[in-house]
Amino acid sequence: MAQPIENHGIVGDLRTAALIDLDGTVSFFCWPRFDSPSIFASLLDDERGGSFELTPLLYDARHRQLYLPDTNVLLTRFLSPDGVAEISDFMSIGDSDAGSRLVRRVKAVRGSIHFRMRCLPRFDYARLDPKVYAEAGTVIFTGGDDLTLRLRASVPVDVSEGAALSEFDLAAGESASFILEDASCGEDSISADPGYVSAAFKETSDYWRHWVRRSTYRGRWREIVNRSALVLKLLTSSEYGSMVAALTFGLPEEIGGIRNWDYRYTWIRDAAFTVYAFLRLGHVEEANAFVRWLGERQSRCGTDGTRLSWLRTGSHRQRSAKAAAARHLRRADGRLVPFGQVR
């Protein structure tokens, strides 16, 4: 059963972001942008939504999530009398080919631990089961709209019933990695380099720490303020300067309530608060980028019927998306999952 939204961490690359629960499962992920169709949505429907599971098989383990200080690198820890395991999750930033990649590295901190991985994407809001096959030691998932993903792993992976599967053992101090990327980068992409994961981990961590150091806040709540700013930054599009209200669609404000919208839009009021927070913290570049983007949208207002109460976060060609419901998906409360323009 899907975990509550509060039991999730977030990683992203300023183009999209993924939610990862306390069990180490990627339960919500739209690819390749915030407003793209989902590839994992078990948060909404754990039977049909699709997920990327990575977990140690430890008896009576306690689960903890935290971030590497001053970064958006997520650590999920499993603590058991039999051993301790840790998953490091991040989306790489600064790759030389500008590709989008979700990087997952798991490590046995103490004890010899058995792990299980299952990657089961469901394309186009879980309306499409991708074709899955092995290629040159990787696994390819391909479907409609020319979307093709590659899963690269440092341990053997099998293909069965539409999923990539792996079970493996790690001794204390050993690690294994999994990289989900756009297959158009080719089988010889930069992620094929044996040193890629370590290099990307450092480069991504350095990016976030450099960004945090730009803050002018020096008050007593610095750690909390910086963490909040990092989350707001993750909801910002580096390509457009726009800001999503939230990553998700189909999650009501309260079970059975009417506030059940697709929040992957820029809501002007909400974004204004974010811009104000960025300005107060000295992140002027983000505020300026948003104002430029908003000005471009406003210049088209009146010519194409755009309303300025909310806007699609991506290109202007996408923001006329019509309201729809994923009738094949059912939330835990039994209701349909809406997405698109619903207000």
Image: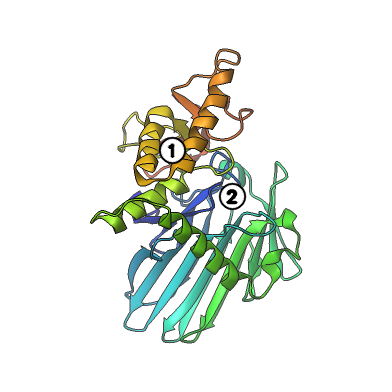
For residue 41, above or below residue 275: below
Q: Position of residue 86 (x, y in %)?
A: 43, 73
For residue 81, above or below residue 71: below
Residue type, numbered disc 2: Arg
Describe the element under mark 1 as helix, strand or loop.
Answer: loop
Q: Position of residue 55 (x, y in %)?
A: 46, 69
Depth check: give the residue in front, 201 or 162.
201
Q: Quadrant of the N terminus?
A: bottom left
Which label is found at residue 250? Answer: 1
Depth check: give the residue in front, 189 or 286.
286
Disc 2 to disc 1, how far (Cα)?
16 Å
Color encoding of the figure? rainbow
Which label is found at residue 258? Answer: none
**Which residue is rendered at x = 40% and y = 61% of the image?**
70
**Which residue is rendered at x = 38% and y = 38% of the image?**
274
Q: Position of residue 134 (x, y in %)?
A: 73, 65
Horizontal side of 64 relative to 13 (left or right) equals left
Depth check: give the residue in front, 43 or 222.
222
**Which residue is rendered at x = 56% and y = 46% of the image?**
15
For residue 330, above or below residue 3: above
Describe the element under mark 2 as helix, strand or loop.
Answer: loop
Task: Give the mark nearer the N terminus: 2 vs 1.
Answer: 2
In the image, farthest residue toward the top: 302
Q: Which residue is mark 2?
A: 122
Q: Residues within 10 Å of mark 1 (few under 14, many from 20)?
A: many
Horizontal side of 227 relative to 290 (left or right) equals left
